[in-house]
Image (cartoon, rainbow, N blue to C red):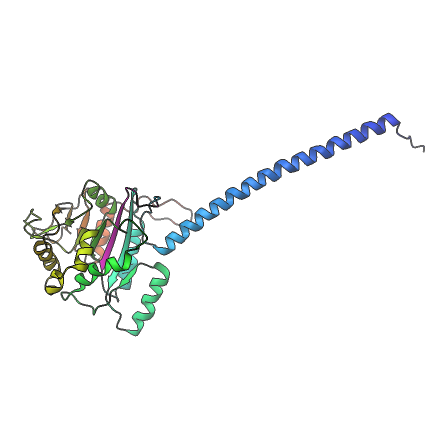
Amino acid sequence: MSIMKPSKSEKGRFIILCFFFIISLCIYASINEARFDGLLRFTRGCDAANNSSSSSSSESLTAVSASSSSDGGDDIRILIGILTLPDQYLKRHFLRLVYGIQSVEGAKIDVRFVFCNLTKEDQKTLVALEIMRHDDIIILNCPENMNKGKTLTYFSSLPELFNDTDRPYPPYHYVMKADDDTYLRLPNLVESLKPLPREDLYYGYVIPCRSMDPFVHYMSGMGYLVSWDIAEWIRESDIPRKHFEGPEDKVFGEWMREGRRGKNRFNGKWSMYNYPEPPTTCTHELWPDTIAVHLLKNQEKWIKTLKYFNVTDSMKPSKLYHIP
């Protein structure tokens, strides 16, 4: 069997084809390297953003919405302090669900659970675990009490806890004291605050029930809110320290009157109200414009309230579960 040798012209064509093939491979590799580099930079950028988001979430798992502005901007910043007791572990876990699923555009809302010094060995371990996981607890330097100054300690501690000398603006526009049996609908709360002043403000549900005049009476403990400058005034003024024992929300109103603070007062009635059962002069039926429902003293009342506002309707579908 004879083997034919390629001619010189065929050898030349083969060499030229190989040359162009090698050049094509180089160009293709260069293009894909550029694409890979671009993809890598994009991925790193996403990872950085995700890491930043994760870091922010770990710092405040109950922060409902974060502002993108570095100087405070126009977003409303609110601190909600839920006054409770150290042993109320299950209630705190439940409230984390209730507030963790709410999101608000144009606002940064931090929810914190507030109580006084721990007194039991089991509290020191269990509360420490909560702090490590959620970082949403404030432990005040006071003995646990109902009407002997816990409210004073709470408000007067805030400037020291949150003020930053390097920041030219206050950490929050508003600070709130709320009960752990109150359901706050955060989007409605923010909408009600948007047109209001951010200084010398006192906002809530006026007590007694029949009163509509926030300048004559005081705000209910279900949840009332003041501007940051009032928290600073409470820390610095002698008026609260001279008189802090007694029904604390009524006493708070007396501070405002004696110190001539809270010239901007707003009554949230009837968007803030007590649960409708049993019916009293402080109650009415649940309705869509609600900001706060108070006296949710048991699970049945919580469930009825959450079902009325359809809080689980936005749950995404999945093959992993079936809830009729």
- Residue situated in front as seen by the camera: 289 or 57: 57
Q: Is residue 155 left or right of residue 16?
A: left
Residue at horizontal 11 percent and vertical 47 percent from the top: 263
Residue at horizontal 21 percent and vertical 55 percent from the top: 300
Q: Is residue 73 magenta?
A: yes
Q: Is residue 19 magenta?
A: no
Q: Residue furthest right?
A: 1
Q: Which of the 4 image quadrants contains residue 144?
A: bottom left
Rendered location of residue 20, percent (x, y): 74, 30
The number of callouts visible is 0
In the picture, which quadrant includes the N terminus? top right
Rendered location of residue 238, percent (x, y): 13, 62
Q: Which of the 4 image quadrants contains residue 124?
A: bottom left
The reply to whether residue 240 is visible in this rendering is: yes
Q: Which of the 4 image quadrants contains residue 150?
A: bottom left
Please provide the residue range marked out in magenta.
Answer: 70-83
Q: Residue furthest bottom?
A: 121
Residue at horizontal 15 percent and vertical 59 percent from the top: 237
Rendered location of residue 248, percent (x, y): 13, 61
- Residue situated in front as seen by the camera: 269 or 57: 57
Q: Is residue 220 left or right of residue 191?
A: left
The reply to whether residue 301 is visible in this rendering is: no
Residue at horizontal 18 percent and vertical 47 percent from the top: 199
Rendered location of residue 52, percent (x, y): 42, 50
